[in-house]
């Protein structure tokens, strides 16, 4: 069976590694000319770490990242909103890690000949014989199955679900990595009035941070001016925030609007299925974007193994296992984002007071549900490489 994966990001690489370990030989087609360690940091919550454990990569992730034992939620004046909450599930920890380090970790587990760079997708067609992908370099290939793991603005998704649209959350997000001693194993998120600032240690000497705002500089888009804007906008935040902004090189500052997609009622059509952000892009308000993508990637591989003779059944089972739980996470992410959009001071204070009354055990129940992996029966004992 020939499997083509469009997109060499976290979802695409995780899918490819999982399928390879099950005996398949998937090929990944990535638009970029090279896979640079771009981006900032991410949190690998216990569900993502469970996937890495299944793939034999957990220890490498722990070695390259920073374990996070708890999350603090505080006001911009450093007054605590919510008590420290566990970021563990059983013996699985959460880990802060640079996105580039995770990308390299996944690349190391994939045979080099299965990754094809400089392949920007231009067109996808399918019929009873297979799926044909045409790329900008004029290459054309036909496969039995095509998996779209090409992110938020997925070309594959637009091919099979052209009516789907993105949603703008109304927030602008800046991200960066500061080279300062972390000295902590807790992540912190500060909530202000229409603003928010998160702190995530990703190594002993690096902290990943993100800042959101419902406004942004007008008419100025050079990174150096955005840094000045952020330093002014967050000047009343704790000293740690001000130090992180000061320590971040302007050329490393990332800025983009927070956007997700309208939830899809289905994730596949005939021989084409969507994985990761292409299927369920979400705003990053629970730190679950990469984790949910990795869980979906691992799940679809397991579904292929469980139903090796029936593509439609494999796709349908994947959708049954993942669609509803992921949509719940998407909705929670959206709601949290809208709460932090508030700009009326007394409403923000009321919001914070009400959240502080929520018992810790309530949050822990929700996290256990979010961190859970789908329960999948073991695959039948047969050679899956020749099937379909």
Image: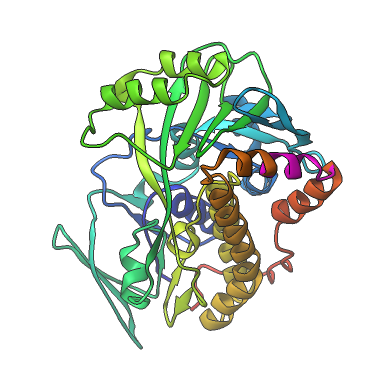
Coloration mode = rainbow
* Identity of the residue drawn at 31% across and 21% down: 250
Magenta region, main secondary structure? helix
Residue 73 position by quadrant: top right
* Identity of the residue drawn at 43% across and 32% down: 175
Q: Nearer the viewer, residue 265 or 357?
A: 357
Q: Is residue 383 visible?
A: no
* Identity of the residue drawn at 70% across and 25% down: 79
Above or below residue 218? Residue 3 is: below
Residue 229 spot, x, y in % from top left: 35, 25
Q: Nearer the viewer, residue 63 or 239?
A: 239
Residue 243 spot, x, y in % from top left: 49, 13
Q: Is residue 20 visible?
A: yes
The residue range painted magenta reads 351-359
* Identity of the residue drawn at 62% across and 67% down: 322
Position of 44 with respect to 242 (left or right) is right
Residue 48 spot, x, y in % from top left: 63, 46
Q: Nearer the viewer, residue 349 or 383?
A: 349
Residue 357 counted in the magenta span: yes
Residue 176 counted in the magenta span: no
Position of 82 with respect to 179 (left or right) is right
| Quarter of the rendering occupied by the N terminus | bottom left
Residue 302 spot, x, y in % from top left: 62, 64
């Amino acid at each position: 069976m020939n499997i083509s994966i469009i997109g060499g990001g976290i979802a695409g690489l995780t899918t490819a590694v999982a399928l390879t370990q099950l005996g398949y030989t998937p090929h990944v087609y990535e638009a970029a000319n090279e896979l640079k360690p771009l981006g900032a940091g991410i949190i690998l919550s216990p569900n993502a770490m469970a996937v890495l454990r299944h793939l034999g990569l957990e220890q490498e992730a722990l070695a390259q990242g920073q374990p996070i034992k708890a999350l603090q939620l505080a006001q911009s004046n450093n007054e605590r909103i919510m008590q420290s909450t566990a970021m563990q599930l059983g013996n699985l920890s959460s880990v802060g890690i640079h996105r580039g380090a995770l990308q390299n970790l996944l690349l190391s587990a994939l045979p080099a000949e299965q990754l094809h760079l400089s392949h920007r997708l231009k067109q996808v067609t399918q019929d009873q014989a297979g799926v044909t992908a045409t790329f900008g370099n004029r290459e054309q290939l036909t496969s039995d199955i095509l998996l779209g793991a090409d992110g938020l603005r997925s070309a594959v998704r637009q091919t099979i679900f052209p009516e789907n649209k993105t949603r703008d959350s109304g927030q602008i997000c800046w991200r960066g990595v500061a080279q300062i001693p972390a000295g902590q194993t807790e992540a912190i998120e500060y909530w202000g009035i229409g603003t928010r600032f998160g702190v995530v240690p990703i190594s002993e000497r690096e902290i990943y941070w993100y800042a959101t705002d419902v406004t942004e500089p007008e008419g100025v888009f050079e990174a150096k001016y955005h840094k000045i804007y952020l330093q002014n906008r967050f000047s009343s935040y704790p000293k740690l925030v001000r130090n992180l902004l000061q320590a971040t090189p302007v050329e490393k500052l990332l800025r983009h609007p927070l956007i997700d997609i309208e939830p899809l009622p289905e994730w596949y059509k005939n021989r084409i299925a969507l994985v990761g952000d292409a299927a369920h892009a979400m705003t990053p308000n629970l730190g679950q974007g990469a984790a949910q993508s990795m869980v979906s990637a691992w799940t679809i591989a397991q579904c292929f193994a469980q139903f090796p003779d029936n593509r439609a059944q494999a796709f349908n089972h994947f959708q049954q296992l993942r669609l509803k739980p992921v949509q719940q996470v998407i909705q929670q992410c959206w709601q949290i984002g809208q709460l932090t959009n508030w700009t009326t001071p007394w409403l923000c204070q009321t919001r914070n007071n009400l959240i502080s009354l929520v018992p810790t055990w309530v949050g822990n129940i929700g996290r256990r549900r979010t961190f859970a992996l789908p329960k999948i029966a073991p695959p039948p004992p047969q050679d899956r490489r020749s099937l379909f």
